[in-house]
Image (cartoon, rainbow, N blue to C red):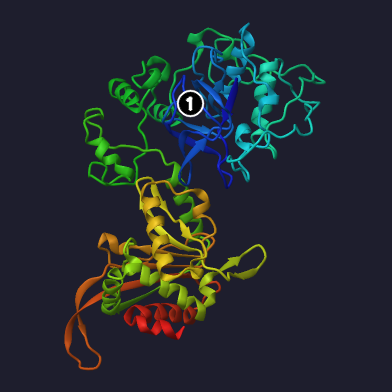
């Protein structure tokens, strides 16, 4: 039997949520078959299987967030029984995210017919088999010779069982170059140290090494099944989870269970008031939580709904805070007559080259940005604080900010400056479609050099955008509306297509003259696309 550990799919991610399983117990899978869809801090990712065989068990339910290195699925031969943890699925804890793995290890060792993972069957050339995805590509991987054997570190506590040793080996290997490696259990120089259980009043005696007390006691001794956000809510409201009967999947305790107990108990501990002042108003909370609050599933009288900050939204919040309080932002505005651009777009849509491609004013803006950078290369540079250098990029990875149900993502078009107009139009269409489906991969969001955010699709005139970390400027594209406009030559008031552009830039190395020149060049191309020939 082989267990697939949750891999780091890139850029040091530490946890992921199981969104949807693509297989079920009993299915036959081949190497590279997609088995699960996960949500990381940046995007939805489909994971292929590094093993072949029969799906014996799905170790993590949908909707659960688990750290990298956690076993999520067991795959083995037909008729092979998966190892079952004591007392059912062992929950993980905030203090020890690998507690559930240790409980499983103890149960495997206790069973006379427990199946062990054969380390020789782990594909060490495939980091996904061990939870490491650094530079990984599952396609075309073959099993490699086993590398140098790692011996247990002396002078520290060592697992007292073979199963416990295998669990420790996989956890350590998930974060080590080359993935997990195996070796025989080596006795430590000192006696095993009992694990410290941080739960109050444990009923069972503490076990040795990685095996916790819950794994040695009766099934009823395992604490209530609830997610960390639910545990925090219960703590805030003064609710004892052990007194509740869960109504969620597999008997897990939900927020509704906690709120129901709090409403029926005396003097619960009040939860802090969220800064959002419109919990009852549709759209007042993230991701449609207000709609869930009005669906009738919340307890009677509840005036607020709390939603955990995770995944893309958590990453976005961190990135925006870092940028806003690191780079001194300056924002400049310009209102421009883009009638000539809208007329150009109408003509391009009729050309055969763009028959199967979406053409919009955003395409012309993207080309204008690339051209204007030739005159003001500082816009396409970045400030290196550690080296005290300004790094000029001789390529343009053009980012397009996209709003998705899971939060803001900024995928970018690699080497956009080397693309023709038709190629750029196709790339824009593919990028936006993939982003709105929530399937943008982490690699597609890395390495951006400049970003366009199109708030005009929401009918907004403009804004003061925050620079994407690692870049030096961002351009906000407002809505195109019919407005009265004074003709400079005749002085007459005419109706024209007008929009507003707002450019935020890093004032550490881009001064007002450079930012203004770039913005004026972009506006000039939109006002008269023929001036593009001058660049």
The quarter of the displayed image where residue 256 is located: top left
**Left or right relative to 360: residue 379:** right
Between residue 25 and residue 243, name the one nearer to us: 25
**Left or right relative to 280: residue 377:** right
For the N terminus, give its image quadrant.
top right
Outermost bottom residue: 490
Q: Residue at x 58, y 69 (%)?
A: 393
Between residue 279 and residue 140, name the one nearer to us: 140
Task: Name above or below for residue 366 compared with residue 340.
Answer: above
**Left or right relative to 92: residue 274:** left
Q: Position of residue 124 (x, y in %)?
A: 68, 34
Q: Residues within 10 Å of mark 1 (few under 14, many from 20)?
A: some
Q: Residue at x 52, y 21 (%)?
A: 54
Q: Position of residue 469 (x, y in %)?
A: 51, 59
Q: Position of residue 426 (x, y in %)?
A: 40, 61
Between residue 149 and residue 314, name the one nearer to us: 149
Task: Name above or below for residue 483 compared with residue 169.
Answer: below
Outermost right residue: 189
Residue 14 shows in this picture: yes
Q: Residue at x 41, y 75 (%)?
A: 368
Q: Position of residue 87 (x, y in %)?
A: 50, 12
Which residue in the protein does label 1 denote? 60
Between residue 303 and residue 298, name the one nearer to us: 298
Residue 96 shows in this picture: no
């Amino acid at each position: 039997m082989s267990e697939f550990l949750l891999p780091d799919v890139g850029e040091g991610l530490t946890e992921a949520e199981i969104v949807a399983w693509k297989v079920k117990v009993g299915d036959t899978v081949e190497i590279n078959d997609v088995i699960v869809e996960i949500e990381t801090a940046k995007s939805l990712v489909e994971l292929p299987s590094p093993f072949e065989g029969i799906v014996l068990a799905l170790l993590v339910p949908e909707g659960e967030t688990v750290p990298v290195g956690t076993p999520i699925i067991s795959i083995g031969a037909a008729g092979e029984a998966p190892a079952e943890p004591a007392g059912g699925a062992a929950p993980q804890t905030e203090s020890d995210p690998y507690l559930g793995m240790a409980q499983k290890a103890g149960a495997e060792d206790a069973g006379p017919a427990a199946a062990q993972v054969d380390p020789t069957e782990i594909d060490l050339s495939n980091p996904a088999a061990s939870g490491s995805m650094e530079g990984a590509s599952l396609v075309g991987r073959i099993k490699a010779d086993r590398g140098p054997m790692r011996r247990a570190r002396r002078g520290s506590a060592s697992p007292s069982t073979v199963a416990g040793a295998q669990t420790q080996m996989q956890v350590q290997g998930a974060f080590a170059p080359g993935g997990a490696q195996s070796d025989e259990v080596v006795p430590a120089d000192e006696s095993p140290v009992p694990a410290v259980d941080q739960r109050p009043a444990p009923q069972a005696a503490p076990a040795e090494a990685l095996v916790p007390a819950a794994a040695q006691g009766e099934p009823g001794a395992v604490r209530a099944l609830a997610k960390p956000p639910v545990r925090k809510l219960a703590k805030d409201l003064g609710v004892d989870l052990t007194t509740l009967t869960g109504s969620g999947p597999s008997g897990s305790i939900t927020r509704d269970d906690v709120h129901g107990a709090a409403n029926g108990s005396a003097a619960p501990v009040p939860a802090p008031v969220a800064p959002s002042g419109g919990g009852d108003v549709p759209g007042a909370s993230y991701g449609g939580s207000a709609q869930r609050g009005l669906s009738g599933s919340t307890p009677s009288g509840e005036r607020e709904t709390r939603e955990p900050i995770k995944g893309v939204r958590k990453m976005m919040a961190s990135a925006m805070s870092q940028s806003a309080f690191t780079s001194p932002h300056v924002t400049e505005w310009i209102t421009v007559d883009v009638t000539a651009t809208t007329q150009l777009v109408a003509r391009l849509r009729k050309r055969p080259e763009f028959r199967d491609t979406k053409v919009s004013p955003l395409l012309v803006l993207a080309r204008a940005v690339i051209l204007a950078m030739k005159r003001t290369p500082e816009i396409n540079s970045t400030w290196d604080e550690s080296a005290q250098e300004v790094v000029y990029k001789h390529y343009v990875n053009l980012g397009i900010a996209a709003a998705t149900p899971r939060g803001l993502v900024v995928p970018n078009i690699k080497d956009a400056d080397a693309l023709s107009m038709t190629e750029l139009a196709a790339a824009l269409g593919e990028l936006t479609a993939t982003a709105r489906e929530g399937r943008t991969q982490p690699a597609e969001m890395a390495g951006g050099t400049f970003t366009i955010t199109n708030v005009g699709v929401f009918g907004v005139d403009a804004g003061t955008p925050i620079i994407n970390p690692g870049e030096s400027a961002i351009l906000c594209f407002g809505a195109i509306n019919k407005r009265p406009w004074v003709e400079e030559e005749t002085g007459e008031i005419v109706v024209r297509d007008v929009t507003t552009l707002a450019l935020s830039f890093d004032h550490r190395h881009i001064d007002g003259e450079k930012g203004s020149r770039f913005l004026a060049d972009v506006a000039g191309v939109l006002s008269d696309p023929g001036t593009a020939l001058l660049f």
